[in-house]
Image (cartoon, rainbow, N blue to C red):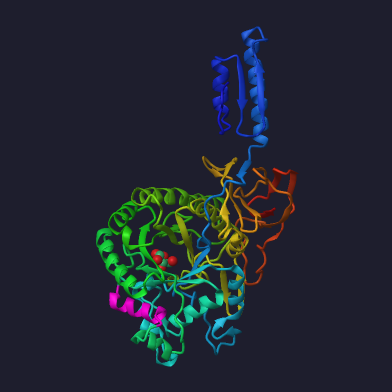
Amino acid sequence: MLFIGDDPNLFAIFFCVVKNKVFERQLLFCSFDLKLNIKLESIKSLRMKKLTLIVVVLLVAFTMKAQVNVLQIDVDGGKTQINKNIYGQFAEHLGRCIYDGIWVGKDSPIPNVNGYRKDLLEALQALKIPVLRWPGGCFADTYHWKNGIGPVADRPKIKNVFWGGTVEDNSFGTNEFLNLCELLGCDPYISANVGSGTVGEMVDWIEYMTSDDNVPMANLRKKNGREKPWNVKFLGIGNESWGCGGNMTPEYYADLMKQYSNYAAMYGGDKFQRIGCGSNGSDFNWTKVLMEKGRNNMDGLSLHYYTIAGEGWDKKGPATNFGEESYFLGLKKALYMDELVSRHSAIMDQYDKDKRVALLVDEWGIWTNVEPGTNPGHLFQQNSMRDALIASSTLDILNKHSDRVKMANIAQVVNVLQSMILTQGNKMVLTPTYHVFKMYNVHQDATLLPSSLICEQYKLGTDQIPAISSTSSVDKNGKIHITLSNLNPSKEIKLEIDLSGKGFTKINSGSVLTATAFNSINSFDKPETVSPVTFKNVKKLSDNKLEVSIPSKSVVVLELE
Ligand code: AHR
């Protein structure tokens, strides 16, 4: 018996035929229930044997070409929880993210709730954001928090030196951010200033935000109208300290991080988790040094990775009107997240086999050229169906690694890179990426179900990527959610889903996000071009099997129970 394996590789099959070494072969192709016994002993002539085998092989190959997509889900085998914080967001003082995005001010003609833009607030509430990172980004290492508290009229104006030199009036500061988190029902993730700040400035901030004692900073907070401390869960110690946050070596940063981290623990106790600044994409040495020197001083280590769908940082490619090459490249680069996370996790495993230190991908997303005619320092970009697929396939990767990855924060929540929301005057659009996050929030805190996916490739020229991406999870009420993305822009794909174990009794619901083109966007004039609709192309075959036809370039979510 020869097991040809789970890759339907025609060459391998032909190789067997030409060699003709074995007279009885059982070809097992993946798990397709496609079993073939070829009794060649009964055929006398060698020529006939070869011919018969060739015909059979061609038949098999033809059948397999027609259907090679199977997702097997182990319904009873879940062990790891998908941390809801993987669905985290990032708000930076950059361009129109804070001012003119989240915050319009109490006197704005745009409807607002105490200065927060009302339509945006409601849309973010519906998104169930678990955690929000602030105030940067590169901005964080220039931010002096005391400029942003107290009576607004007394707050100094500052120049945002990283992002276009824009002057900000500091009307959105610590109180405004932490109150926003309460309105959204999410945990705040504060990035402390290590690049141009001091340990003293950080511990004062910790005291201002989290202390209930009779100490100067807690009293200052009370004077500013907030009696009770806020619940701050995460504290980042610097941002991109290898670059915009101070140009440090990993060794130097590790020492500094330990100092900041120890004082943070002294003033904040175990109220929050301390996050060390992590690597720039594939700088594996940074992770190694941080784990070697600093693993006992941090609860998490971050990682930043941006998808560039163009030639490089100087030519990142447009966010709209791009061709299939850029579509393909964007997806391929996004899928690199899997290798990155695997390799950083493997390094972390060497020092921390119990996985106490979490990996936090606290900046990710597609970064394109700015929209023509907008301030280059404000990084405002549109968002397309391609970006929705980048979001879904990246979330699938992060879910898969949820034994180590405990948080991720897509950049940025509004009006910047891969945003959830875009605003223009009193108009607002929900981007295709917003819809993906909303569809995927069923996985928040659910148990990841082990699965294996055998699927065809989406090919462009000589290059290829897997055409399907997926996550399966079961929530605390026993509902199974399966998210599926078809990355092929022009082919509907049939997928068989096999659920082992107790299976399911009914399909509760399904929705699909797709568009007429891979570069379709939601514009201010046509804000609903890319919006989810009910999904019907799903058939129950048995209590353990269903068949789904996933439209080209689409994201599907199914609920079974
Ligand atoms: O998201 C934009 C910038 O990208 C962030 O400020 C910085 O951390 C990263 O380089």
Looking at the rendering, in which quadrant would you find the N terminus?
top right
Image location (x, y in percent) of residue 381:
52, 67
- Determine whether, in the image, residue 465 is placed left or right of residue 65: left
Pick the residue in front: 514 or 147.
Answer: 147
Image location (x, y in percent) of residue 180:
52, 78
Residue shown at 42%/84% (left/top)?
Answer: 170
Residue shown at 47%/78% (left/top)?
Answer: 177
What is the span of residues highlighted in magenta in the rendered image?
A: 196-212
Q: Quadrant of ligand 1?
A: bottom left
Image location (x, y in percent) of residue 223:
42, 91
| Magenta-span inclusion, residue 210 | yes
- Determine whether, in the image, residue 152 is placed left or right of residue 276: right
Provide the major secondary structure of the magenta segment: helix
Pick the residue in front: 518 or 205.
Answer: 205
As drawn, 466 above or below 253:
above
From this viewpoint, which residue is outermost toward the front?
213
Image location (x, y in percent) of residue 330:
51, 53
Residue shown at 39%/47% (left/top)?
Answer: 346
| Magenta-span inclusion, residue 177 | no
Residue shown at 66%/7% (left/top)?
Answer: 44
All told, the count of numbered labels is: 0
As drawn, 275 above or below 94:
above
From this viewpoint, which residue is outermost toward the top?
44
Visible residue check, residue 401 = yes
- Determine whether, in the image, residue 238 is placed left or right of residue 36: left
Visible residue check, residue 157 = no
